[in-house]
Image: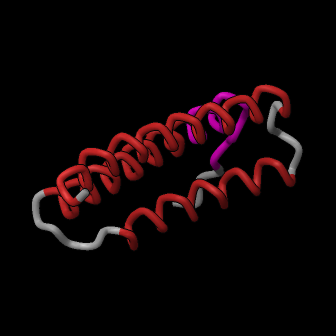
Amino acid sequence: MNETIITDERTIAVENESYRKAYFVLAGGLLLDAIFRSGFLRQNSSDLLVLIFVTGGFATYQQARRGVLARQRWWWMVIATMAVAAVTAAITAYFKFRHRF
């Protein structure tokens, strides 16, 4: 019953890969739920979006604090993500509010 679990680099890599995939599934599911709630049910979904941003920010903070982020590549990814989000928000706002003006 008291077996010693041997952890090596492969075990740690497999664990980290499973955590990464689980996070993507969870974040994707929350995004789809937020889209469904706001689009079809006309409910406020800001709580789900805040949860996604906080968990992503926490993971990024931990990686940056421990120095495992590739700094130059990381900044370009952040800038590209922000640009895509801004364009998506502008298009969504245009189609949502075009009949009001």
Q: Is residue 43 left or right of residue 10?
A: left
Quadrant (top left/top right/bottom left/bottom right) for the C terminus = bottom left
Q: Give the residue displayed 63% in from the left and 47% down from the top.
A: 5
Q: Residue lying farthest front?
A: 101
Residue 58 at what x, y percent from top left?
66, 61
Q: Give the residue displayed 17% in from the left and 53% down from the top.
A: 99
In which image quadrant can residue 38 be found? Answer: bottom left
Residue 37 at what x, y percent from top left?
19, 63
Q: How many tags in the picture?
A: 0
Q: Residue lying farthest left?
A: 40
- The dominant secondary structure in magenta is helix
User: Closest to the observer: 52 or 38?
Assistant: 38
Q: Is residue 51 above or below residue 82?
A: below
Bounds of the magenta segment = 5-16
Q: Give the residue displayed 47% in from the left and 67% down from the top.
A: 51
Q: Is residue 47 above or below residue 37?
A: below
Residue 19 at what x, y percent from top left?
52, 45
**Is-magenta flag for residue 54?**
no
User: Closest to the observer: 24 or 72?
Assistant: 72
Q: Give the residue displayed 86% in from the left and 54% down from the top.
A: 65
Q: Is residue 90 left or right of residue 71?
A: left
